[in-house]
Image (tube, rainbow, N blue to C red):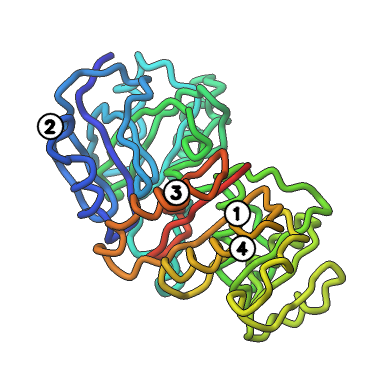
Amino acid sequence: MLTPFFYACCQHGIQSLVKEQLCDGDETYRLAYSRPGFITLKANFPNDVWSTTVPRGPFVRASGHIVSKIEGSSTGELVAGTLAQVNELDWQSMHIWQPDSHVPGHRGYEPGPNELTQAIGEQFSSELERRGDPRSLQINRHCGKNTRVLDIIVEQPNRWWIGTHLVSQIYDSWPGGVPILQLPVSMISRAYLKIAEAVAWSQMPIRPGDTFVEIGSSPGGACQFLLQQQLRVTGVDPAEMDESIVEHPKFTHVRGRAIALKRRLFAQFRYLACDANVAPNYTLDTVEAIVMHPSNRLSGILLTLKLKDIEAAKGVPEMLTRLETWGFDQVELRQLAYNRREITAALIR
């Protein structure tokens, strides 16, 4: 089956930049329909629905081929209609998700599964099970490389887009590009979500006992996750840390600013993260001074770079160019599902 239509999912509020980046004048893509956080495009070529030729970019969270749009008055009607339309498609797993309705963290909003997508998933599972289809067990689960995924993109309860994608990157295996995380009973802050996703996306090869330093660690959300991975963690921040983190036997708090510390003090660490609420160049200056010091032994870095507006986001290519001079084998940038107005850089030797 060939289709010239594609979809791209991005953070709510960033779609104007994504449109500009995807339709940059070479006429590969033309805009079709869009709404906040969700864009459809028409390409100047037909493509197989399982091709990996799909829109990509640091601000594109999920992307794939559009097969059709379906509308109906009930979920049961939509489920039956969808399965009838994709009867000839040899899909293996199904992802059901909604585009973001708000910026992550806004009044408690977080991306990922919700009551509506879970209810739709249950109806699909029940119907597939009734038909004796073993794919009833492959709904909204992480899946492996080269898995053929059927996307049910719930724009509204009565209007869905049917899409497809082939898993080629780790985030392709996550419904809507949002990882399914095992959260603690009590999460100290949203930084827990961001570092957990960053480690999963980058596939940072951390191991129990590794040394990890976080710059801008207060109140301790990221440290909470890192300690759960059985790492030895040092937090650098002039502000206070959560009491549960301070009392952890594998945690050390350095009260101060990283820029004021001697660079050789960082030689003891294998991994570094920085999520400070400062301008991107300040973060880059601070970490670059550590990386370029002769004592540097870092194997991996995770940086959260704040983007106060669209204009700041347009500077991401220059940030990537600068990061590539630091001497790491792998350098990638991605706006994570749990990022707010920011983007994450991963560097691995």
Mark earlier in primary sequence (2, 4) = 2
Question: Residue at position x 48%, y 59% from top?
Answer: 338
Q: Position of residue 94 (x, y in %)?
A: 46, 32
Query: Distance of mark 1 from mark 3, alpha carbons?
Result: 12 Å
Tell us which disc is closer to us: 3 or 4: 4
Q: Image quadrant for the C terminus?
A: top right
Local crowd at mark 1 within 10 Å, few (<14), some, or many (≥20)? many
Identity, as a three-letter code, of the amino acid under mark 4: Ile
Tell us which disc is closer to us: 1 or 4: 4
Mark earlier in primary sequence (1, 3) = 1
Q: Image quadrant for the N terminus?
A: top left
Identity, as a three-letter code, of the amino acid under mark 1: Ile
Query: Distance of mark 1 from mark 4, alpha carbons?
Result: 11 Å
Circle 1 — which element?
A: strand
- On residue 301, which mark appears? 1
Q: Which residue is mark 2?
A: 27
- On residue 290, which mark appears? 4
